[in-house]
Image: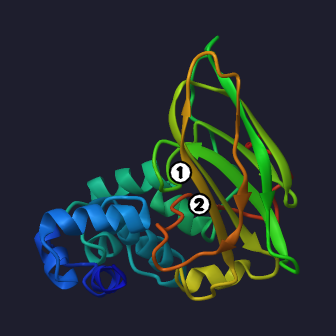
Amino acid sequence: MGRVIDFMHENIGEQFTIDDMARTANYSKFHFSRAFQRVTGVSPGRFLAAIRLQEAKRLLVSTSLTVTDISHRVGYTSVGTFSSRFRSSVGISPTTYRQLGGFAVHIPMARRAGNPRSATVQGEISAPLGGAHGLIFIGLFPDGIPQGSPIRCSVLSRPGPFVLTSVPPGTWHLLAHSVALGRESMLGNGPFADGLALSVASSGPITIRPGVPVRHADLTLRPIRALDPPVLLALLDVRTVALGAGAAS
């Protein structure tokens, strides 16, 4: 699977299929798709799409290329499609992302009406001793990629207990990430340029059913790895964001 992910990065601007990825892995297409999903938590196609948008994020903050040029470099033939998918995944437009230097001042939640069958997801997030973690973002998402608007989210100033209330029925993935203090500027050099800069954690899928008012899930932060789907949400700007502004449980 690592070889296939390297292939994705090396051919990010090219058009290739799942058959090409399966051949790179020396698997049949069917076996490859199942194995990739098991290892990474998402399908090969979703992982490739995430890598393309992650590379676009890097190019936006580290080069002066136009949005159109960047869209072509990461495999999009239509700048309109690229801009739409970037906004829906990252939370802001490519131009705004560039203007903000790759960070966001808040992460909006998906708008959902109150549900009498909603529940609470609570637990504790921990981190290795000695880590200088910044703000910790925790959110519930429809799948294993932290992108778009979370169903519910919260921001912690340090590892510890968390509570997400009014969680609607459904199946969600609990995802967290944190940028190490003092390492924010290093993230612009690539998603794996500094393994200590971005830490992630995940749990799920978590199914919320009527009649079960509380679900418990714990998380442990660790450095992001090549097999982890990229964090597509614009990272919170720990230099200016006040705790709880725009992202609260």
What SS does tag 2 mark?
A: loop
Q: Are marks 1 and 2 in contact (CB under 8 Å)?
A: yes
Three-letter code for the amino acid on which mark 2 is drawn: Ala
Rate crowding at label 2 as few (under 14), some (14 to 19) or many (20 or more) other CA atoms within 10 Å.
many
Who's the residue at 24% across and 71% down the image? Answer: 75
- Marker disc for residue 225: none
* Residue at the spot of label 1: 91
Who's the residue at 79% across and 69% down the image? Answer: 127
Q: Quadrant of residue 11?
A: bottom left
Rate crowding at label 1 as few (under 14), some (14 to 19) or many (20 or more) other CA atoms within 10 Å.
many
Q: Quadrant of residue 77?
A: bottom left
Q: Left or right of 231: which side holds 236? A: right
Three-letter code for the amino acid on which mark 1 is drawn: Gly
Quadrant position of the C terminus in the picture: top right
Q: Distance of mark 1 from mark 2, alpha carbons?
A: 7 Å
Who's the residue at 54% across and 68% down the image? Answer: 98
Placement of 193 over or under 70, stated as above or below: below
How many numbered circles does the render carry?
2
Q: Quadrant of residue 116?
A: top right
Q: Residue furthest top?
A: 116
Q: Where is residue 185 in the image (x, y as percent from the top left)?
A: 69, 82
Along the line of sight, the residue nearer the viewer: 124 or 152 = 124
Going from N to C along the chain, the mark reached first, 1 or 2, is 1
* Residue at the spot of label 2: 234
